[in-house]
């Protein structure tokens, strides 16, 4: 058996969107990167049917994700014209055909000469030395050749967390009970998604069950581009789908009580058998087609049991089983004589597209693994971190935030068990009103294993994972992982010893959003400073009010945070009457610099932190104060570690 050995600065395992962004971010900063993917194609779910970006607030996630959507938009404009229907349907690049997403991802990789892309390799082993990952072993799926890759830092961007499991990192699998973290929606649950109430039988007990896996279809209504299923798939059993007939008869295939843009609601299909799917229109007469988890006939819960810890041969059997179940459902709706004729006619308007997945029977490559292993990291994000303490505040603030998170808590059923009133399957949760939150770096860092970063199967509870598991957020986390890995290489530090402020500064300079405001103009001179201090507690709510005068109570609180973050004790004598004018604030900054022993170029420049020349007696604005303290912070801290405690916990 032929063996190869290669050395890189960074090895990324998993050609998911997060893995791609990690590789691109690291390569652009100068690192040599190997990006290794199991399939013969990259892009994970974003190139395998998930053609709409799961994002509610487009201001929350930027950076490389925005570059990706921008490239998608420019592609459709360039090919079809800016006023075309396809440009409208791409929705500024947030909706796309699978083949277009794959093309854009491949372009981004090809442009980076530091990236070596290795397709068709399954991970087989990991070697650690002194609690750090130093090598990963792979097998070529075609010729069975083995491959050993060495690197200074590894990134596990797989949906399953395969690399960190092989490396010996601790992880969770299944659902915590309510008693573990005190989460309202943890454990066994029957939840009425329309009324948002718990139903009888919701015990909150933990178990090893996982949300159902499926495939995400891409269908077309273009007869000239249709691959028609003329026969049922292998092993077709009609009985897998007949419960849907009761769903139709008893009214469970109607629309939701609350319609939300971008959630795959297609009113023409309400109260028909087409409602077993959720359609979202994408360009070129195609549709992103999810499988509706709200019907009691949903046949997929429990089919993923034992998948995560299985070997590759067993996993392939699970892939085939789910493929057959998915194609069988499409065949059933289109052909079964008990499905109303008008519904069958409607279903037969949609087919697999001939120009997608051309080497896989026009069926997606990537299996939709919604949740698998979850790392035990240096912090565990829970549902409690997503809920504000009161109506006027934001959720938990994390000084090591690397991205703003946002999306409803959305977990598919884990079992075919029905609630007593036949409202829902067990484990389904849909909580729409989730406010933008902060995602700490520590959830990507294993408790005990170093030189390993985990942007996908990260350290959260089951409930929290149900919001963080969206591809746009994972792309942002991947960008953070790649940037951290490159900093660890260039600074010659462990991944948990890279100064977090240097990581955040690099992310901010690349356009990443660390925390969301409802009044922040990204073109504001103080935008980066406001985000930096926003994750450190300057702004308890979502308003930054950067152009408003700084008030004494805010100044005192901000100064206290600044001193705590820099580990300084000076500053108690800086306050004086007039400190909140431009002249007075400048004197205060100089006083802080003198007490710190800063001189010359290490001092802040008022021209850099003022919005304009202004009147010396005019009030200093909140944005100006943020900028001045931001500059002073970096002059003081340099490459030293900030006051981030990398301890375990939640």
Image (cartoon, helix red, strand yellow):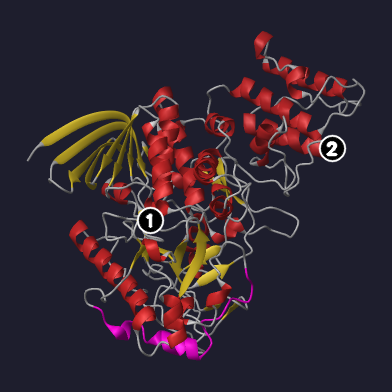
Instruction: Tell me: residue 132, above or below residue 420.
Output: above
Instruction: Inspect this view and state whether residue 457 appears.
Output: no
Residue 371 drawn in magenta: no
Residue placed at 61% from the left, 75% from the top?
196
Q: In this view, does 54 lie to the left or right of 490?
A: right
> Which of 556 and 219 lies nearest the eye of the viewer?
219
Q: How many marks?
A: 2
- Decide if residue 171 is on the left or right side of residue 78: left
Label 1, label 2: how far apart the Cα atoms are:
47 Å
Residue 111 placement (x, y as % from top left): 40, 30
Say which residue appears at 34% left-offset and 74% top-offset: 302
Q: Where is residue 497 in the image (x, y as percent from the top left)?
A: 45, 32
Residue lying farthest to the top in this orientation: 600
Q: Is residue 256 magenta?
A: yes
Name the quadrant of the N terminus.
top left
Specify whether 288 is left or right of 369: right
**x%, y% of residue 180?**
48, 64
| Mark found first going from the N terminus, 1 or 2 | 1
Depicted 442 relative to depicted 250: above or below: above
Q: Mark 1 points at which residue?
A: 48
Q: Residue 538 location in percent, x, y?
A: 72, 40
Instruction: Give the label, 1 or 2, closer to the camera.
Output: 1
Question: Does 371 appear above or below 295?
Answer: above
Q: Label 2: few (<14), some or many (≥20) within 10 Å? A: few
Front-most of 553 and 524? 524
Whether residue 435 is visible here, answered yes or no, is yes
SS class of the residue under badge 2?
loop
Could you say whether the residue bearing mark 1 is in a helix, strand or loop?
A: loop
Magenta extent: 236-259
Give the labeled residue for mark 2: 548
């Amino acid at each position: 058996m032929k063996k190869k050995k290669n050395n890189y600065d960074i090895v990324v395992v998993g050609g998911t969107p997060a893995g791609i962004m990690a590789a691109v971010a690291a390569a652009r900063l100068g690192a040599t990167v190997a990006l290794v993917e199991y399939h013969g194609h990259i892009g994970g779910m974003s190139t395998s049917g998930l053609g709409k970006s799961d994002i509610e607030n487009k201001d929350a996630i930027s950076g490389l994700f925005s570059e990706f959507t921008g490239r998608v938009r420019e592609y459709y404009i360039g090919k079809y014209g800016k006023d075309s229907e396809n440009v409208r349907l791409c929705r500024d690049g947030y909706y796309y055909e699978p083949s277009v997403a794959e093309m854009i991802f491949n372009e981004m990789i090809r442009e980076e000469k530091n990236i070596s892309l290795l397709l068709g390799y399954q991970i087989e082993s990991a070697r650690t030395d002194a609690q750090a990952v130093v090598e990963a072993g792979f097998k070529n799926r075609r010729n069975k050749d083995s491959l050993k890759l060495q690197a200074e830092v590894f990134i596990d961007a797989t949906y399953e967390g395969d690399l960190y499991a092989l490396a010996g990192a601790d992880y969770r699998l299944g659902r915590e009970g309510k008693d573990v973290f005190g989460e309202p929606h943890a454990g066994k649950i029957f939840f009425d998604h329309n009324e948002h109430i718990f139903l009888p039988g919701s015990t909150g007990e933990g178990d090893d069950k996982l949300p159902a896996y499926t495939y995400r279809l891409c269908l077309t209504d273009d007869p000239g581009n249709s691959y028609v299923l003329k026969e049922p798939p292998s092993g077709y059993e009609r009985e897998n789908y007949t419960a849907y007939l009761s769903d139709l008869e008893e009214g469970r295939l109607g629309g939701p009580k609350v319609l939300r843009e971008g959630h795959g609601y297609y009113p023409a299909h309400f109260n028909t058998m087409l409602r077993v799917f959720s359609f979202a229109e994408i360009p070129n007469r195609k549709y992103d087609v999810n499988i509706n988890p709200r019907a009691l006939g949903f046949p997929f819960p429990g089919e993923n049991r034992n998948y995560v810890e299985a070997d590759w041969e067993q996993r392939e059997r699970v892939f085939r089983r789910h493929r057959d179940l998915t194609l069988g459902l499409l065949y059933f709706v289109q052909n079964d004589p008990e499905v109303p004729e008008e519904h069958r006619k409607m279903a037969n308007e949609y087919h697999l597209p001939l120009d997608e997945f051309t080497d896989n029977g026009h069926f997606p490559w990537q299996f939709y693994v919604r949740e698998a292993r979850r790392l035990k990291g240096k912090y565990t994000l829970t549902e409690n971190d997503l809920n504000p303490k009161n109506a006027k505040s934001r959720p938990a603030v994390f000084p090591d935030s690397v991205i703003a998170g946002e999306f409803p808590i959305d977990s598919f059923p884990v079992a075919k068990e029905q609630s007593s009133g036949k409202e829902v399957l067990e484990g389904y949760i849909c909580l729409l009103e989730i406010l933008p939150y902060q995602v700490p770096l520590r959830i990507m860092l294993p408790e005990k294993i170093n030189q390993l970063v985990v942007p996908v199967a990260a350290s959260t509870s089951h409930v929290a994972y149900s919001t963080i598991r969206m591809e746009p957020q994972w792309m942002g986390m991947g960008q953070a992982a790649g940037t951290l890995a490159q900093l660890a290489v260039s600074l010659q530090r462990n991944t948990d010893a890279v100064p977090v402020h240097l990581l955040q500064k690099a992310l901010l300079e690349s356009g990443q959003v660390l925390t969301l405001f409802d009044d922040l103009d990204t073109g504001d001179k103080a935008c980066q400073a406001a985000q930096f201090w926003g994750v450190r507690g300057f702004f308890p709510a979502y308003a930054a009010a950067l152009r408003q005068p700084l008030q004494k109570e805010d100044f005192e609180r901000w100064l206290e945070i600044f001193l705590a973050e820099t580990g300084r004790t000076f500053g108690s004598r800086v306050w004086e009457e007039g400190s909140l004018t431009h002249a007075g604030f400048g004197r205060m900054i100089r006083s802080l610099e003198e007490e710190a022993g800063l001189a010359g170029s290490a001092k802040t420049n008022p021209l850099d932190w003022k919005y304009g020349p202004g009147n010396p007696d005019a009030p200093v604005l909140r944005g100006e104060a943020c900028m001045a303290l931001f500059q002073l912070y970096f002059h003081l801290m340099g490459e030293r570690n900030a006051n981030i405690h990398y301890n375990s916990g939640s």
